[in-house]
């Protein structure tokens, strides 16, 4: 957990054991608990979004299994393993119910969790989520693509200041760290970059829901966010202008404001 | 006397593409609009004739392999080539090096096809098994993160399918097959030789040494070749208590021979440079995509590369390629001396791509290279009679019906069929009434 984009120092990671799985998580703030699930990109970054949220809520931000270990654990074969893992994590932390916020792949994981354990999810927020099957507008392929192209696609070409998030082989340690993180993502989505069952499952997410997405997203095309809102029973869409899929870094204030406003309408 | 077996190796590239600098990659994304099937037809014809010619030239074997969606090697289905070559040759060994086992949903398809080839070729097949490069996983969309486990399980399943009586059940981590009962069974017993082609990955070398599978090293420098072959010997001797036969170790090192050193360099240089600059133009994110290796193994690879000061293939100059030992080019005497040194330094007993095609080399030059290799170099590493390995072995199956009748004898079962009358007839003679009358079958006979 080395990458830091925030101005303030990130909280020290806490190592906990969830059943037999070691988990590194960061926790900051107080109030209602928000579980933040990171995405495929810059998973270890503590961002201004984290800081802004932590000023208002008790923010729990774990790393998904494998992202800190350089590759997927043997037992991780699919999203259902993560659903069970997060059920155990909430039990371990004694959290009966959380507000769930997931970015990118974290939105996909969060939706699966909320479909299986809706009673554990007070509200659901998906930020530029991936996972839906939209064959006419597929997700950008980033696991075997040039890091420069990936960066340009994430930030709609406004890459300046974010270069360190895409290390090359010149910095072996940083490169290998990112390679291992992508290896976990590969285990989850290499053979299918969407789940055709997800759309139908979204009907089970009857809790208040919010989708936040950039108006122009070159990683997950904007039509995905519209589909999420169509299929989430109690949801609305907040669109953010002038940013790309990297909106959590590019417009953390606007994203945080949307989340906080939404949470203020959901009884704790 | 130092001995070497010589294998003609072919990638069947399609060289009529833009130079390396103008491509993101020769793999995966190079548009196939660059491929003209009429040109491809001519190339395939020439390439196949080169491989067939290897038998009369006296090479020990011919090798094809599997790559996908690339101009580097236009041979996505190597078993098809092996079938063609088996039909067009009589005795020479044919190696498929190899089938990419984890790419198969059911690896028994490989067991079946290799067994088919082995039976129809008269027991001449070498079965190379590979995990496949990272790029192949991108092309196929198959999960690279499980590929090592799938590779070894597929290998073990194939070997068992060839060697254990079927049907038996296989319930593995990756493959669940209730009835493993492969028809045909291979002709070579206990099974066709298995080769493990690989780069300098210690995991491949260690596994090859443990299983006594011949290891074939893909092109690299003399320095890295030495460390790879030393490791095979060391692991075999220290961990598994045996001294490897030199024929367990092969090196793929493209060799071009001509009348003089100068002439050899003149001929080979442009085609060698095409191979290294264009043919090997593959970015890291295609070669080793996310999930293909663990972070730890990637770290070892990158640190090893940095420590060795190794340049990427596309960055090496022609002189560096020659001096580093990535290729061998010269007069027959020069080539003989370099091979002698290779045998002494590495303890190897096989050399691949020894004469033959590389990169964009035209047909006439390939045949010239092959003929000079066969007549001026190979005999030096052979017994006085000059025979290739296959010419000093009896074929595993009789070549003629007369030999078959004289040596194999009748099959275990006569083909019989039950008629409406309840009588069984022998289908080979049953159409002749007087024979049927003379040897009536009993009703209860089965």
Image: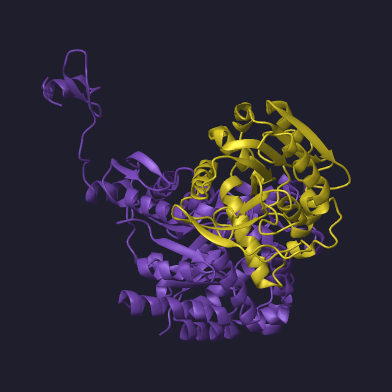
Residue A216 in the figure: left or right of residue B327: right
Colour assigned to chain A in the rendering is yellow
Q: Is residue A225 above or below residue A177?
A: above
Which one is nearer the viewer's eye here, B370 or B214? B214
* Residue B259 visible in the current orientation: no
Residue B51 appears in the picture as rendered: yes
Compared across the picture, whether B59 is left or right of B11 comes to left
Image location of residue A243, percent across then percent down: 85, 48
In the rendered image, which quarter contains the N terminus of chain A? bottom right
Residue at the far top: name it.
Answer: B421
Residue A240 image-quadrant placement:
top right
User: At x 85% / y 61%, what residue is drawn?
Assistant: A160
* Horizontal and vertical percent position of residue A207: 64, 30
**Chain coloured purple in the rendered structure:** B
Residue under the image location 68 percent in, 48 percent down = B41
Q: Residue at 71% of width from left, 73% of height from top?
A: A170
Instruction: Place residue B376 in its image quadrant.
Output: bottom right
Q: How many labels does the image show?
A: 0
The colour mode here is: by chain
Q: Can you name the residue that lies furthest to the right here?
A: A242
Q: Where is residue A173 in the image (x, y as percent from the top left)?
A: 64, 71
Task: Tell me where residue A209 appears, x and y as whole percent.
Answer: 70, 33
- Image quarter of the C terminus of chain A: top right
Q: Nearer the viewer, residue B43 or B194?
A: B194
């Amino acid at each position: 957990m080395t990458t830091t984009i925030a101005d303030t120092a990130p909280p020290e990671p806490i190592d906990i054991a969830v059943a037999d799985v070691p988990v590194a998580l960061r926790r900051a703030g107080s109030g209602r608990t928000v579980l933040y699930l990171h995405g495929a990109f810059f998973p270890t970054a503590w961002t201004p979004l984290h800081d802004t949220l932590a000023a208002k809520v008790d923010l729990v931000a774990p790393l998904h299994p494998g992202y800190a270990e350089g590759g997927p654990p043997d037992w991780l074969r699919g999203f259902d393993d993560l659903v069970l893992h997060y059920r155990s994590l909430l039990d371990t932390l004694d959290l009966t119910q959380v507000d769930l916020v997931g970015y990118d792949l974290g939105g996909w994981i969060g939706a699966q969790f909320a479909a299986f354990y809706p009673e554990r999810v007070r509200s659901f927020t998906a930020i530029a989520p991936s996972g839906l099957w939209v064959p006419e507008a597929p997700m950008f392929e980033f696991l075997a693509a040039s890091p420069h192209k990936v960066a340009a696609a994430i930030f709609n070409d406004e890459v300046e200041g974010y270069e360190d998030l895409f290390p090359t082989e010149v910095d072996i340690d940083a490169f290998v760290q990112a390679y291992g993180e992508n290896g976990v993502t590969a285990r989850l989505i290499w053979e299918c970059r969407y789940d055709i069952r997800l759309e139908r499952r979204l009907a089970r997410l009857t809790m208040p829901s919010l989708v936040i997405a950039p108006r122009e997203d070159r990683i997950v095309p904007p039509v995905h966010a519209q589909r999420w809102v169509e299929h989430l029973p109690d949801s609305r869409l907040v669109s953010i202008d002038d940013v790309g899929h990297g909106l959590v870094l590019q417009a953390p204030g606007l994203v945080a404001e949307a989340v906080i406003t939404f949470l203020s309408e959901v009884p704790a | 006397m130092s001995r070497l077996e010589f294998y003609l190796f072919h990638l069947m590239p399609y060289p009529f593409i833009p130079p390396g600098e103008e491509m993101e990659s020769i793999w995966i994304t190079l548009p196939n609009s660059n491929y003209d099937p009429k040109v491809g037809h001519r190339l395939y014809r020439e390439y196949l004739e080169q491989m067939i010619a290897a038998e009369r030239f006296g090479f020990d074997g011919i090798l094809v392999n599997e790559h996908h969606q690339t101009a580097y090697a236009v041979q996505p289905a190597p078993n098809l080539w092996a079938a063609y070559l088996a039909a067009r040759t009589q005795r020479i060994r044919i190696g498929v090096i190899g089938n990419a086992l984890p790419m198969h949903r059911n690896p028994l398809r490989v067991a079946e096809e290799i067994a088919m080839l082995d039976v129809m070729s008269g027991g001449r097949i070498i079965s190379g098994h590979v995990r496949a490069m990272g790029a192949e996983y991108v092309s196929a969309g198959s999960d690279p993160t499980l590929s090592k486990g799938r590779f070894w399980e597929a290998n073990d399943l194939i070997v068992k399918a060839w060697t254990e009586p079927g049907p038996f059940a296989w319930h593995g981590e990756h493959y669940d097959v209730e009835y493993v009962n492969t028809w045909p069974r291979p002709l070579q017993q206990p099974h066709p030789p298995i080769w493990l082609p690989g780069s300098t990955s210690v995991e491949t070398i260690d596994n090859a040494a443990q299983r006594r599978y011949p290891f074939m090293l893909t092109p690299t420098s003399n320095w890295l070749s030495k460390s790879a072959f030393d490791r095979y010997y060391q692991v075999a001797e220290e961990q598994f208590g045996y001294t490897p036969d030199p024929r367990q170790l092969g090196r793929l090192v493209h060799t071009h021979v001509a009348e003089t050193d100068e002439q050899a360099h003149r001929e080979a240089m442009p085609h060698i440079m095409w191979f290294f600059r264009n043919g090997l133009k593959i970015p890291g994110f295609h070669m080793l995509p996310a999930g293909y290796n663990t972070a730890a193994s990637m770290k070892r690879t990158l640190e090893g590369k940095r420590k060795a000061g190794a340049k990427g293939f596309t960055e090496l100059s022609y002189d560096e390629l020659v001096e580093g030992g990535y290729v061998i080019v010269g007069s027959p005497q020069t080539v003989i001396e370099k091979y002698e040194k290779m045998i002494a330094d590495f303890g190897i007993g096989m050399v691949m791509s020894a004469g033959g095609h590389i990169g964009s080399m035209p047909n006439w030059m390939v045949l010239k290279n092959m003929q000079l290799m066969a007549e001026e170099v190979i005999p030096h590493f052979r017994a006085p009679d000059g025979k290739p390995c296959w010419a000093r072995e009896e074929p595993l199956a009789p070549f003629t019906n007369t030999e078959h009748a004289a040596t194999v004898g009748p099959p275990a079962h006569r083909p019989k069929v039950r008629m409406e009358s309840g009588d069984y007839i022998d289908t080979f003679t049953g159409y002749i009434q007087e024979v049927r009358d003379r040897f009536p079958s009993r009703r209860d006979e089965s």
